[in-house]
Amino acid sequence: MPPAADSGAIELDALESRTAFREWNARLPGQRADPRRFGMLAAALGVDLEHPAPALGVVGSKGKGTTVAYASALLAQTGLRVGTVFSPGLVSNRDRVRVNGAVLPIDEYAALLERVDAALRTLPEPTEGYIGPSGFFLAAGLAHFDAEGCEALVLEAGIGGRRDDLGRVGLTGLSMAQVFLEHTDLLGPTIAAITDDKVGAARTGARFVSYLAQSDEAEAVIRHQLATIGAGGMRVDAIAREPYAGVVAEGLGGMNAAHGMIAARRMLAELGRLDATPEHVRAAAARVNYPGRLSRHTLGASTVFVDSAVSREGFQNALAHVERITGAAPALTLVSVPREKDLAGFRAVAAGLSGRVVFVALERVHLHYPERDEWPGEWATAAELPALLRSATTVLAIGTASFSAEVLRHCGVDTDRVF
């Protein structure tokens, strides 16, 4: 098990609850975020949302974090000072905001939270909606990066694009990872509607949109947005990935990694800087430490594989990966996916597994988990997770990024640097 929480960790958790999560914790039933509050908070912090440092935004349903990590690493490898916002963090909220891959020291992080909260308290009371944690941390990151003199930013969206607080930031470019049906209550009932919201984070003034190969329906929406805002388009498919073969992993994770580097190179061109060399690419890829994407960890006598897949194909890919590495299917599979992801796909795959499959429902998350009787198998709570991780020789833990973060925390994984 991880070390017991010390008084400093407890104090930090309380500070985050009092600041970054204050309005979200106080939200009324059915109340949604008010995007105007993000703009008001940024103004109170002295952040110019229309003219930040050159910024690459990253949206999508799956693979955003990997894209962010590799784009940030390559930009930094070429000598730029890079500010990065992850949404969510890898194992904590502190690792959402990074400069050149590193988290802020705890005292600086605490001071930043207090500074942003003080600015937030100058705003009118949130009668029309709240500012969510992702908006709070995005505003905090932008303010911190400005003070740090960052020369390029890589910013991950929370949910969506146009409706997300990221959509209020003047982006140089936008990268879109894989898009599938999710958050239909917020983004719309179809792939076209969801794609429209996500690509809508790129407004007039954005110079390019890069995107993984999508369905015909999604790509038609992307092309329409490109024409509307007058931006260039970059379609990243298997052919575009070829120069990165042997540098990044295979599969969808490798596609997202290559996509991040391709977008970073486009950012360099837009900044008028020399292109990254093959040596830059190899060095940046070698430095990336982004666990939770088919990563392997040792916990006592257990080997734990962690993946943040939330689709049937991702689940199948993770199972195949474990079997390739160990020669057998995992003895125990821990699953944690909400209704708004591919729950039906997960159920179908889980039904065909011979080993134990346990659904784990976390606490204090904003996800909509299925009811107990909707999962055809064992069920566990977050309190049971530490024992489960140690209960089998080979464990696959798969689900949302928040679930991966919880598993990585129990495995004691160091994420102070992602590159």
Image (tube, rainbow, N blue to C red):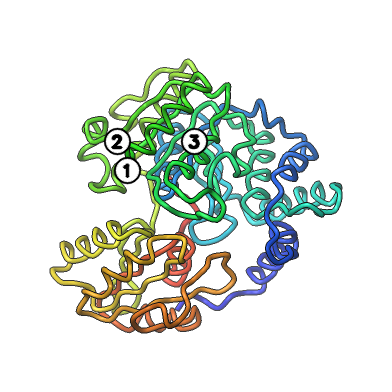
Q: Is residue 282 left or right of residue 222?
A: left
As drawn, the label of residue 286 is 1
Most foreground residue, 254 or 349: 349
Place of residue 235 in the rendered image (x, y in percent of width and height, measured from the top left): 33, 30
**What residue sits right under mark 3 in the picture?**
199
Residue type pointed to by label 3: Val
Most foreground residue, 41 or 201: 201
Q: How many marks?
A: 3
* Residue 400: quarter of image: bottom left
Q: Quick one: label 3, few (<14), some, or many (20+) residues within 10 Å?
A: many
Q: Is residue 338 above or below residue 230?
A: below
Most foreground residue, 124 or 417: 124
Q: Is residue 162 above or below residue 87?
A: above
Q: Is residue 358 left or right of residue 83?
A: left
Q: Is residue 333 above or below residue 80?
A: below
Cβ atoms under marks 1 and 2 closer than 8 Å: yes
As drawn, the label of residue 212 is none
Tell which tag, 3 or 1, sits nearer the viewer: 3
Q: Is residue 245 left or right of residue 229?
A: left
Q: Residue at x 55, y 61 (%)?
A: 92
Q: Quick one: label 2, few (<14), some, or many (20+) residues within 10 Å?
A: some
Place of residue 27 in the rendered image (x, y in percent of width and height, measured from the top left): 73, 63
Hey, which residue is sitting farthest front in the picture? 189
Q: CA distance from mark 3 to mark 2?
A: 30 Å
Disc on the earlier residue, 3 or 2: 3
As drawn, the label of residue 282 is 2
Q: CA distance from mark 3 to mark 1?
A: 30 Å
Q: Quick one: label 1, few (<14), some, or many (20+) residues within 10 Å?
A: few
Place of residue 302 in the rendered image (x, y in percent of width and height, measured from the top left): 29, 77
Disc on the earlier residue, 3 or 1: 3
